[in-house]
Amino acid sequence: MKTSIKLITLAVIAASSMNMAHAANADITQFIAMAQGNDFNNAKKSYFSLNDHDRAVVDSFANQAGISGILADIKAQPIIHTASATSYPTNADLIAMNQQRTAPQASALKAAQALRYHQLAAERGQALTEANQLRAQAQKDALNAAHVQRFKELKAQQIQEQANGLLREVANRIRTQPQAEALQGSELTAMNQQRTQAQTDALKASQAQRYHQLAAERGEALTEANQQRAQAQADALQGAELTTMNQARTASQKDALNAARVQRFKDLKAQQIQEQGNGLLREVANRIRTQPQAEALEGSELTAMNQARTASQKDALKASQAQRYHQLATERGEALTEANQQRTQPQADALQGAELTAMNQQRTQAQANALKDAELTAMNQQRTASQKDALKASQVQRYHQLAAERGEALTLANQQRTAEQHSDIPVAQLSDVVVNQDKRDDSQDTALSTARTHADAALHDAAINKNAINDNKGEINKNRADIIKNNEDISTNTQNISKNAVSIRDIRSEQTAQGEYVQRNAVAINQNTTRINQNAADIQHNSQRIDRNSQRIDDTRQQLKRGLNNAAAMTGLHYHSNDAYAISAGTSNGDGAALAGGLSHSITEHTAATAQASTSMDGGWMASVGFSGDF
């Protein structure tokens, strides 16, 4: 009974093994390897290329193989067959799309890097200038130390030479002692002085030569330091060009303000001259109005006075117009300054946007590097997983081959055993056959147990791989979320760059419009300058005319004073009789005086003639003759 149960069990196992061997064909094995390797696109193609029977086989053991999740995803997204082969974006296409999307960001980054380069150049120039100053100070200190050391060496050499000279002198004295006794003390002193003088001259020459050598070395060191300092100053100058431009603009505004002040001073000076002329004219008019003798003035003088008054009024009007023009120019300068500030503010905003874009690009670059590392890790994991899956598939295939071979062996053994059972053999031989069959059954049970153990280990490894695949899926989903966020950040950066580009174009348009406005203002200012110069020339001419008129007014005043004084003196002449004389003195307003004298003579009893004259004693005089009579 036990033997029959074993035979039935072996037959069932053999039949099951044959069915599994039939299902494990090359296409199914390839699909399982792709699915376990997370090669979604190729697994999708491979699955839909299977026939219905193979798909049913795959569906039956999907859970055991750990591919139920990816199989559900494949079924949820069926493949679309078209007239041509199914196309998917390649890595080259994705790289090109990313390059096109990041090209504006790269341009903005280069602009920000150029600006940062100039800022760093300016900072570097300052740093180099400070470094050059420190290096120059160190060189100067080293040179001074070298001078001190050289002075000490020369001093020691001088002392040594003096000692050597003294020794030679003592030796000479000892050697020439017999001859020296005859020499006078004064001669020895003179010889010593000459020798000392020669030694002193030699020492001075040596010191001068060393000094020139040190001066030459110091000059070379200073020349090199100056060259380095000049290079640093050139770098700093390049970084300070923007500051120089701003200073130049500020200087031009200051020059315009100074020019306006100078023009205002000229206007005030012209107004002052005009007021002085008007005061003189009013004084003359008052005198003319208060003096009855003003009727004697010529009509041409009155016309000249009216013309001068009209010219002064015109000059005052021009001065008022010039003052109003300068006020308008000042207001326009303030408006231009405000416009420059408004124009500078969008530029600062655009620069701030470029800096933010650079920061976003740096953050995006770091994320891209992290994503690249994650992709490489995922690729390595996929490659390792594919290798593991291929190994497992090979092991499964080998397991099925062994199972098939074992099934065939069991079938052959069963056939032989069945044939032996149907044959007419003795009971003893049948017992031997049963015993041998039991041994073979035990060995087969052992092999089957070993195969089951390997199969369980393979399923356990598949479960572990499934967990690892799920972990990889989580990492992949996280990377996808990061990629989506990066794409959103890149899109936002692209929009910001577009807005900045629009702002820059608007700023350039505004700069162009302001440039045209400034050009028109420059033309108008040149025209106004020409007119102002013409007005200045007219004012100069009018000033000369006013000076001449002032001189004429002074001359007229003097003449009027002399005439009034002479008239006052002539008015005081009264004759006592027809034959008489008269003397009189007179003044007008107490300004000067005149002396007059006259004679009266009777021609007939009823007629007489008179003659009189007066002088103001400053070149003015008056004379008259007359006749008188009675009825």
Image (spheres, rainbow, N blue to C red):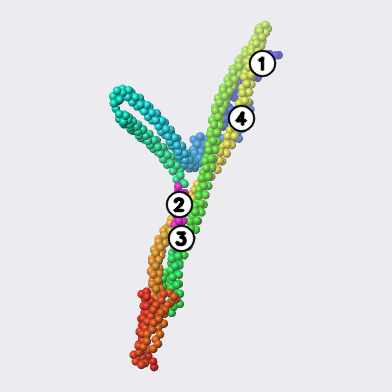
- 3 or 4: mark nearer the eye: 3
Q: Quadrant of the N terminus?
A: top right
Check disc 3: other Cα within 10 Å, few if <14, some if 14-19, many if 20+.
some
Question: Residue, x 59% and y 18% (percent of image)?
Answer: 402
In this orientation, which residue lies closer to the viewer: 76 or 374?
A: 374
Disc 4 residue type (three-letter): Asp
Q: Quadrant of residue 217?
A: top left
Is 569 situated above or below 338? below
User: Which region is colored magenta?
Assistant: 244-259
**Could you tell me which secondary element the residue under label 1 belongs to?**
helix
Do residues under tags 3 and 1 come within 8 Å of each other at their CB atoms? no
Disc 3 residue type (three-letter): Arg
Query: How many numbered marks does the figure carry?
Result: 4
Q: Earlier in the sequence, mark 1 or mark 2?
A: 1
**Could you tell me which secondary element the residue under label 3 belongs to?**
helix
- 1 or 4: mark nearer the eye: 4
Q: Which residue is mark 2?
A: 251
Considering the whole magenta stretch, tell me its main secondary structure. helix
Q: Earlier in the sequence, mark 1 or mark 4?
A: 1
Q: Which residue is mark 1?
A: 7
In this orientation, which residue lies closer to the viewer: 63 or 359?
A: 359
Q: Is residue 254 magenta?
A: yes
Residue 88 coordinates in the image, percent (x, y): 52, 35
Marking on residue 471: 4
